Amino acid sequence: MKRILLLGLLVAAAPLAARDKPENWIELRSQHFVVATNANEKQARRIADQFERMRSVFHIRFPKLQIDPPSPIIVLAVKDEKDFRALEPAAYLAKGQLKLAGLFLRAADKNYVLMRVDAEGDHPYAVVYHEYTHLLLGKSADWLPLWLNEGLAEFYQNTDIHQKDVSLGEPSPENLALLREQRLLPLATLFAVDQKSPYYHEQNKGSIFYAESWALTHFVQIKDFQGNLHRLADYAELLVNNVDPVEAAKSAFGDLQKLQAALESYVRQASFYAFKMTASTEVDEAAFKVQPLSPMEVDALQADFLAYNDRVADAHSLLDRVLKDDPKNVSAHETMGFMEFRQGHLDEAKKWYSEAVQLDSQNYLAHYYFAAMSMNGSRSSSNDAQIESSLRSAIKLNPSFAPAFDSLGVFLGTRHRNLDEAHMMGLTAVGLDPGNIGYRLNVANVFMVMHQGQNAVQVLRMAAKLAKTPEEIQTVDNYLMRAQQYAAVAQERRQQNPPVPEDAEAEEVQPSTSEASGEATEVSTARSDTFVAKGPHLFLTGILKNVLCKSPQMDLTVDSGGKTLALHAQNYYKIQFSALNFAPSSDLNPCKDLEGRPAKVEYVESADKAAAAQVLAVELHK
């Protein structure tokens, strides 16, 4: 993300003005954007036209790239600085802070642009274009190195869109001035920078990182065009195939010392080329739909933006006003649910989302969040019907939203019904977001429930090729080990005995449930067949997850405030189960009924550092 968009310590925000004289707001919907503005319709049409043309530029430049997010980008175009400051991040309201003309607010499920209609300068919306580039390249982030990700964003932020052509890659005076004042980073260092590097996080080093990333991207693109080369494409292909960024650079660009010398000369030259793109970026303005927004609709929209922008108090102030005038306002219920969810108040969030769903919400996120939170609670047949209905509604409302497909696949898999559909739901989620490792793990779990161990192994082997971080690699390895063990046992039984009844086999492997984000949690299975205790008995309170049985053994994890503890039982019949302030069902099945339950566990660590701790007792909580 662009350095100036990182939010620091929040300061007191300017209060929103009372609604004494409501302004006239309109909403314009184009093919891929929603523009809400208190300016006039002519300006709204110009803004929508510019964004649609910018999208077309990327479609032409990257024809194979899936560039559209699951939901339209919402552009809040305000008339002047006063209106902008009422909505911009609180960190920029302090005296002496940088004055922005626009910003891009990216979230996992929604994307906002805030911009001033009266902005001036050569590139007043450079920050917006920079972040828009990151959004469009988002699905490539798993293989795209940080220098190229930021270099491309810097390259496209100075785009100028005209009626008949588009100017790309105009040089950045600020970057050039910095590069001529400071020593460039060695290219081997630049190529290896990641999110943990001080060159990305420290301001004095981060600025040279951004500038040099821009310069190298600009240099290679211009030289490739002039020489009819494709070095950047070659470099990208090597990265997709998991080649180390430095080795890939040597293969694609040649001798890095010569490239370094050429780059240093390049940034000191007097003039620079830019691309002129004359390909058609025409927009069908006849498809634009314009309608007025009521003061209540404006308040609800601004409250939602403020909620995503971490100005919670201001959002609450607007929402209180909306709900007082209209207690059944669906948008206000959705935003209240989102704020409670962000603050970890899951019961309150579930209540607001449940009410939004009952009020006939047409927002796929309301249906999805309600279902995702309900799946992590207690299981009942009445809840199951509501969960399934909400997930199917989310899919119907937004067929491009992968988490809803993944959650429906997990839901059906854990209920052991409609398993063919559960499999297809999981595959659809993977197709929509191929880089999400958690989706592939959940597909493997469904295969295990279907008693198709070899198919689970194949899915996990592909996931292993895509795993990047040490945590992802360890998680996939653990899942793969279990799947291989299961497949081997199943194969041995088929060879030695008649077919095992399905009920008996199904108890041995339980699929793990996914979180609302679709991410998988790490599972540690290292253990010793002969357990030797070390130290006193310990206790931990949290949520039980990843409960897996291979009778009579059990593995599970406890998630406690971000800390994850892996536990093992050689014989789960010896675990002492109890309940605090409620009576559990007499037919409690540890292998099926512990997943997602809050509890306090008693355990003892192993003398073998490679072995998981041994669980001794579980006290279930409401």
Image (cartoon, grey):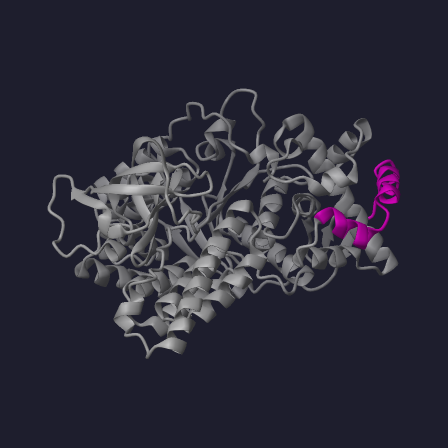
Side of 219 relative to 237 (left or right): right
Dominant secondary structure of the magenta stretch?
A: helix
Query: Where residue 63 sits: x, y (%)?
Result: 65, 64
188 inside magenta stretch: no
Q: Quadrant of the N terminus?
A: top right
Which corner quadrant of the image does residue 591 belong to? bottom left
Tell me if 86 is positioned left or right of 382 in this view: right
Residue 137: horizontal and vertical position, in percent? 60, 53
Residue 207 position, x and y percent, is 68, 31
Along the viewing direction, whichever of 132 and 144 lies nearer the viewer: 144
In percent of the image, x 45 and y 26: which residue is there? 10
Residue at 44 percent across and 62 percent down: it is 485
Q: Which region of the structure is painted magenta?
A: 245-273
Identity of the residue drawn at 65% across and 44% down: 146
The quarter holding residue 514 reads: bottom left
Was residue 249 drawn as part of the magenta stretch in this picture? yes
